[in-house]
Amino acid sequence: MAALYLFLLFYCTLLTFGQRYQPTWESLESRPLPDWYDEAKLGIFMHWGVFSVPSYSAVWFWNYWKNGHRDIVNFMKRNYRPDFTYADFAADFKAEFYDPKRWAAILEASGAKYVVLVSKHHEGFTNWPSNYSWNWNSYDVGPHRDLVGELADAIRNTTNLRFGLYHSLLEWYNPLYLRDKANNFTTQDFVKFKSMPELYELVNRYKPEVVWSDGEWEAPDTYWTSKEFIAWLYNDSPVKDTVVTNDRWGKGDMCHHGGYFTCHDKYLPTTLQKRKFENAWTIDKNHWGFRRDARIEDFYSSQELIATFAQTVSCGGNMLMNIGPTSYGTFQPVYEERLLQFGKWMRINGEAIYSSKPWTAQQDNATKACWYTMKKTETGTNVYAILVEWPDTNYMYLKAPITSSSTLITMLGYQDYNFSYSKVQPSGVNITLPNISFAKIPSTDAWVFKMTDIAN
């Protein structure tokens, strides 16, 4: 009887307080991903820091300079005094035009459901007044503002977006980190006194619902004490019920362990993935931060971005679309334009995106410029064919769908019109494409055909 009593007490405790996750990958990865993240599909990433001041070669500027990259060295020789240091850039990181409420409005207008702001990149500068980054943070130098806190408040007070934070575990030139590295990571002074204390500080102070880790690749997760942190995050943190995190927690972990997978930057599979993933994709084709020397051809068009997004969602992923704010606290007009173009498309076609699930097919085998999503209904399955290139002919052949007697085909945003189609044996459908006036076609970037009650 005593054993039964103890079992029942333990069971009731679990029901009352929820499961306790242990600091092992097996236990941590048994936690279900909170539903909101899969339903969201689109987030906005923002790389902002001292690197935004030189705004040349973007976010790895300091590392490239220290390692003698010729173009960076010559840039510094041409434009700065001989004794200029990277730390000197911080005084010009003023963010004088930073308006968090305006940022929040633009981010929400993009159609995204969450944002991830870089709180600290590999340079070590914190965009909040950290107790663990004396005189190398946005309150002590530069803007003299809590950049993280102001945006967190604006997001939560004026939008329905979820707020998330990026945090780099390593710091390229922190003496504590360099000493641990020289000791082959057998010592952990940097982790104990810098990296982990500030990560706990971030979560407790700003309550991010995405913790986007990076800078893990040189040392194992046992050095970083990552599993212990994630166990706390899932068990006891102020965001334990809603927080999500990624897979960059130690050397060799990426695409193997953690929360959702990122695998590598710009991860864009062509088939359905077994694990939830996120495609971190830049609007600037080659860089993560703001660049003063960027040309218009360096940026993806809205059509290219939406095509990438359609493929990502079809294969089971989210897209985290990156922009680089300026050092003076604004969005470059091309970034703002892309966000607003994306939002316009999402307002028309969000039915095919938000809360959708991958279908049995991802890319159509006949019309390669078509990617599928689906939703279950009370009467059957609605399939959405996202067409990212308009056909040259007056019909479109899709090989994957099998129509039923009650199937209707419409285009999202093109009201009150059922498209004629003919069933193809053994599978597929030919959809007749009428002449649609430019004034009535819902988009010039991508089009969504909704097919109700599909049989497969």
Image: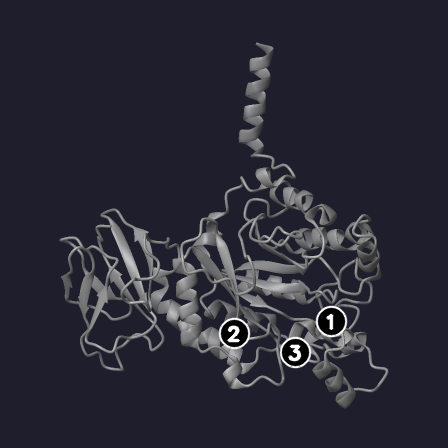
Residue kind at label 2, given as amino acid type: Ile
- CA separation in Å, label 3 and label 1: 11 Å
Crowd band around label 3 with a 10 angstrom C-alpha radius: few (<14), some (14–19), many (20+) = many
Residue that numbered label 1 is attached to: 63
Q: Of tags 1 and 2, which is closer to the observer?
A: 1
Question: In terms of secondary structure, where does tag 2 sit?
Answer: loop
Q: Earlier in the sequence, mark 3 or mark 1?
A: 3
Which quadrant would residue 122 be assigned to in this image? bottom right
Badge 3 vs badge 2, beta-carbon distance below 8 Å: no
Q: Earlier in the sequence, mark 1 or mark 2?
A: 1
Q: Residue 400 or 439: which is nearer the viewer?
A: 400
Q: Residue 444 or 131: which is nearer the viewer?
A: 444
Q: How is the image coloured?
A: one colour
Q: Report the number of numbered marks.
A: 3
Q: Residue 178 or 156: which is nearer the viewer?
A: 178
Q: Earlier in the sequence, mark 3 or mark 2?
A: 3
Q: Residue 101 or 165: which is nearer the viewer?
A: 165
Which quadrant would residue 2 be assigned to in this image? top right
Residue that numbered label 2 is attached to: 283
Residue that numbered label 3 is attached to: 57
Looking at the image, the residue that sits furthest to the top is 1
Looking at the image, the residue that sits furthest to the bottom is 78
47 up-or-down from 257: above or below:
below
Q: Of tags 3 and 2, which is closer to the observer?
A: 3
Residue 342 image point, x, y percent: 43, 72
Crowd band around label 2 with a 10 angstrom C-alpha radius: few (<14), some (14–19), many (20+) = many
222 up-or-down from 5: above or below:
below
Residue 115 image point, x, y percent: 55, 63
Answer left or right for 196 relative to 163. right
Residue kind at label 1, given as amino acid type: Asn
